[in-house]
Amino acid sequence: MKLEQRYEGKAKRVYATENPHEYIVEYKDDATAFNGVKKAQIRGKGEINNAITAHLFPLLEAAGIPTHFVERLSDREQRVRAVEIIPVEVIVRNVAAGSFSERLGVEEGTELRRPVVEYCYKSDTLGDPLINTDTAVALDWAGEEELSRIRELALRVRDFLTPYFAGRGIRLVDFKLEFGRTHDGQIILADEISPDTCRFWDAATNEKLDKDRFRRDLGGVEDAYAEMLRRVIAPAQG
Ligand code: TMP
């Protein structure tokens, strides 16, 4: 049962439940970019991101990555384990794009010799600034051991998802993860994995099938999200 709202983010609402160790997450159609400066609705996004996350998280769990996901409850809702979100956004990159390309002057689409893990402070008012793990420890956002666990899990997510998407005709360019701490101190994967939080390029054409279509006004946003849901749930090809 959904009890009081605990938190409202840009794309989701979080509710308490009768179980103190579980929350219900509701996915909204609201989309923002540039830390909330650009706002719109993407029709069907809430249902699609709920469905994609509900499909992927159990697969990650089966691959040995602990996650907050418990069960999908409805089109827009899922039950999750309650966590305290660690205010560090973890970005994993396979291919140069976005802020990495801009910051370093590396052409978008350049394959990276090895995956790159970056950390940002989760703060809209500051524009999610890039940090390093020393900063997170110094400011008590996470412990040294928690951060090494987070890095290990983030790379395992990458090792699972990269071939998973490749088998469905998608180049996984980069993605953003959030981790949480359970009441008993376990670090688990939280938040979502969806076209809002990943760059997905069609493997054959490099067509963008993610939120960059919204960020960059490329059109076809709803169609791209729907196409990604189809690819995610499809069996692997070849
Ligand atoms: P970036 O290249 O803009 O730093 O984005 C890296 C990845 O993180 C990309 O897949 C989009 C995702 N992302 C979020 O999920 N939330 C954000 O606030 C930002 C800026 C990026």
Image (spheres, grey):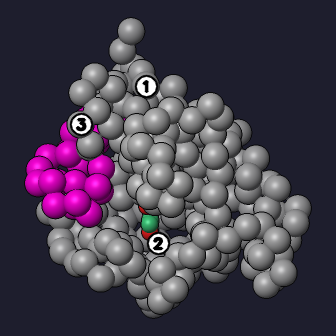
Quadrant including the N terminus: bottom left
Q: State which quadrant residue 39 falls in.
A: bottom left
Tell me: residue 79, above or below residue 23.
above
Give residue 56's position: percent from left, percent from top: 47, 43
The tag earlier along the polypeptide, 2 or 3, is: 2
Front residue (pair 146, 107) = 107
Q: SS of the residue at dot 3?
A: loop
Magenta span main SS: helix
Residue underneath mark 1:
166
Residue underneath mark 3:
207
Tell me: residue 110, above or below residue 11.
above
The residues bearing labels 3 and 1 have C-alpha atoms spaced at a distance of 14 Å
The tag earlier along the polypeptide, 2 or 1, is: 2
Q: At label 2, which amino acid type do we have? A: Ile
Q: SS of the residue at dot 2?
A: strand
Front residue (pair 97, 182) = 97
Residue underneath mark 2:
24
Quadrant including the C terminus: top left
Q: Is residue 150 visible?
A: yes
